[in-house]
């Protein structure tokens, strides 16, 4: 389990795709020092297991189901990723409950500089309309954000300058694919 509070932006060092399997190496400093093989780490909101660590690089593996449903399949060498270690019992819960189980990939429609903060507009598939509410939480590429407005085919969320400059949101542009995880507490009520 995670909180959606990103602790580090890592750099992709290796992407080894073999059929429906992907090996991933991510350069890290903060998360690297605190992690051991078998630890869970959120990469762009996707819960992956550290399988090895070596010389500042954390290694992960992703299988077909993960590749089909997330933007992990789109990662390239030198790309940047959001990193968050798993929540430990007794730690502060600063964001919201994030499981690391992505519900959907969606396109970033707009990223507007509002002179002091940024506003994202993200596509919303009708299948997930019941899983989102205004002023509720959503994880976008692992970042815990508050939903501002919901439209027929999209929703908006605002990003404060600190979050913008400490996550991969600063590198995002319209058309990019984002990982979405809707609030776990709402999912149970939408059935």
Image: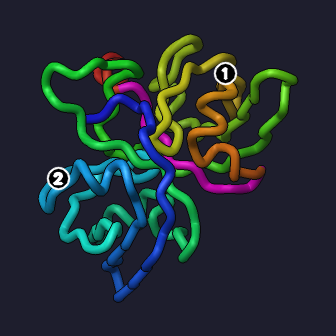
* Quadrant assignment, res 89: top left
Q: Which of the 4 image quadrants contains residue 28?
A: bottom left
Is 16 in the magenta?
Answer: no
Query: Where residue 156 appears, x then y in whole percent?
Result: 69, 27
Q: Does any portion of residue 156 appear in the rendered image?
A: no
Q: Residue at x 70, y 51 (%)?
A: 172
Left or right for 165, reference 34: right
The tag earlier along the polypeptide, 2 or 1, is 2
Q: Quadrant of the C terminus?
A: top left
Can residue 23 be spotted in the picture? yes
Q: Which residue is mark 2?
A: 39
* Residue at horizontal 50 percent and vertical 15 percent from the top: 136
Corner quadrant of residue 99: top left
* Rendered residue at 34%/80% (across/down): 20
Q: Secondary structure at mark 2?
A: loop
Q: Which residues are magenta?
A: 174-183
Dominant secondary structure, magenta: strand
What is the quadrant of the N terminus in the image? top left
Establish if 29 lies above or below 161: below
Q: Which residue is mark 1?
A: 150
Q: Position of residue 62 (x, y in %)?
A: 30, 68
SS under mark 1: strand
**Residue 177 included in the magenta stretch of the image:** yes
The location of residue 44, given as percent across then percent down, is 46, 50
| Callout 2 touching callout 1 (CB < 8 Å) | no
Residue 150 screen position, x and y as percent:
66, 21
- Left or right: residue 53 versus residue 43 is left
Q: Which residue is nearer to you in this view: 8 or 179?
A: 8
- Of residue 182 and residue 143, the one placed in the foreground of this image is 143
- How would you rate the neighbour count of disc 1 (Cα within 10 Å): few for under 14, some for 14-19, many for 20 or more? some
**Residue 80 marker:** none
């Amino acid at each position: 389990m995670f909180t959606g509070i990103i602790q580090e932006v890592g750099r992709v060092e290796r992407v080894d795709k073999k059929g429906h399997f992907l090996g991933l190496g991510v350069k890290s400093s903060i998360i690297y020092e605190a992690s051991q093989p078998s630890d869970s780490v959120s990469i762009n909101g996707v819960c992956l297991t550290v399988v090895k660590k070596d010389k500042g690089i954390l290694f992960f593996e992703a299988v077909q189901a993960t590749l089909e449903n997330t933007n992990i399949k789109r990662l390239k060498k030198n790309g940047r990723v959001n990193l968050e270690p798993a929540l430990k019992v007794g730690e502060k819960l600063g964001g919201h409950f994030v499981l690391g189980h992505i519900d959907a990939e969606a396109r970033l429609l707009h990223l507007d500089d509002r002179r002091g903060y940024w506003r994202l507009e993200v596509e919303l598939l009708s299948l997930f309309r019941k899983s989102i509410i205004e002023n509720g939480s959503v994880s976008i590429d692992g970042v815990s954000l508050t939903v501002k407005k919901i439209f027929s085919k999209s929703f908006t969320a605002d990003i404060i300058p600190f979050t913008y400059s400490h996550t991969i949101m600063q590198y995002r542009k319209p058309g990019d694919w984002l990982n979405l995880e809707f609030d776990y507490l709402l999912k149970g009520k939408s059935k």
